[in-house]
Amino acid sequence: MRFDVRAYLPNRVSGQIVVLLIASLVASHVVLTIAFFYQRHDGPHQHFPDQLATLTELISASPADRREDLVASINRVFPRFELALLPNSPTAALLPPDHAVEGFAHRMGPNYRVIKLASGPSPSPGTGERIAIGLQDGQFVSAQLAAPPFLWFGPGTLTFIVLLISMPLLGVWAALGLTGPLRGFASAAENFDPNGEIALVPERGPREIRVAARALNQMRERIKVLIDDRTRMLAAVSHDLRTPITRLRLQCEFIDDESTRAKMLGELAHMESMVESVLHFLRNSQTGRHAVALDLATSLQAICDQFADTGREVGYHGPDHAVIRAHPEDLHRALTNLIDNAVRHGGKADVKLTVTRPTVTIAIEDDGPGIPDARKQAMFEPFVRGDTARGMNDKTGFGLGLSIARAVIEAHRGTLTLLDRVPQGLVAQVILPQAGTETLH
């Protein structure tokens, strides 16, 4: 059976934070304990004064004629002390007191005389002092008194260092554990496409994160169901309206009054055009179509030529070629809607294409009365038409042109913005990625 430590951890964020704090304190105390015992008992330098004292007593107890051989043997085993027999008694130098030398002299007792030798420049930290030890028979032995290890930090400093290292590390660990799922939530919300496949957010982590992930998954599923039901209902209604419109068109052919028949046929054509616009708006939500290479400059020139052939004043300004990846039919309809709006409300349209890698910008300008800033965003909503300043009447449209255009452009990972033109008029600015995407959403 596999042991899983996560099963024994608290399942709430607050509990996990408490565990992290306790773990940090325990880790700091473990490090302090190890450092304390190392300094007090396990530090190899701590035994050097005792070893030197024992060796000195051994030399003092040995016969004088055998001390040379004994000192040589000791140096082979303990080279750090650098023992040497002095031929003459050294003269005590007037040197500042040294706690290590005084401590060693106290350790040797009154039968031994310990003198600190003047050895030139100050020794490097940790090498100790050069001393002379007077044996009981009056002979002196010089030795290197090893100093205790130099520790520049005490318990308080060590505690601060441990906490300074462990707390940020544990804090980063906790932050990643919490921000990771939150980034997943943000990514899921940003990339949510109710018309495509829904990738469920993993339900893992603390209890609060799992509950939030489950709620987000359920909410996205409900939104998808609601949009699918709305789309099917509107598509069915729009499709079913075609039959009565067709019957009414046939019945209008039997009306003798030419003027009345023309008006009724015009109204029916208006209704049929509205149904077609609604159906196209709903179909535009479908996914899975693949983008292809499209010469945007050539496409814009063709659209402008089509308007010019019908007597509209539409001009193109831009490069001869600009290739992007797009769905040609949808993008053609979206740009046609924008140019048609400019011509209808402004009398003419200037279409300008600018290539600014890695994007392309299309500016469709007109000389109309424009749209107030407070109304610009509302104009993208379905079935919302301009005010009377934009020439609203029964023949101007159904309020779906901008909605369809924005849906198509956003499916191409682009943006559509309405801007004011100086001195007057409106600019429909379209920004599209030049590289495009392989699959449109």
Image (cartoon, rainbow, N blue to C red):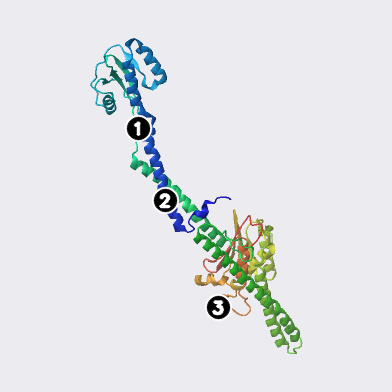
Query: Reading the chain from its start, which is encountered first: label 2 or label 1?
Result: 2
Local secondary structure at mark 1: loop
Q: Position of residue 413 (x, y in %)?
A: 60, 60
Label 1 sits on what residue type?
A: Phe
Q: Position of residue 20 (x, y in %)?
A: 44, 51
Which numbered dot is residue 85? none
Task: Tell me, yes or no, whether the two marked residues, 2 and 1, touch with CB atoms within 8 Å.
Answer: no
The answer to whether one can see residue 167 in this image is no
| Residue 149 position (above or below residue 310) | above
Which residue matches tag 1? 150
Which residue matches tag 3? 388
| Residue 182 position (above or below residue 349) | above
Total number of numbered labels?
Answer: 3
Q: Tell me which residue sits at (24%, 26%) in the image.
A: 97
Nearest to the observer: residue 107 or residue 327: 107
Label 3 sits on what residue type?
A: Thr
Label 2 sits on what residue type?
A: Ile
Using the numbered discs, state the Cα–Cα distance from disc 2 to disc 3 in whole angstroms: 70 Å
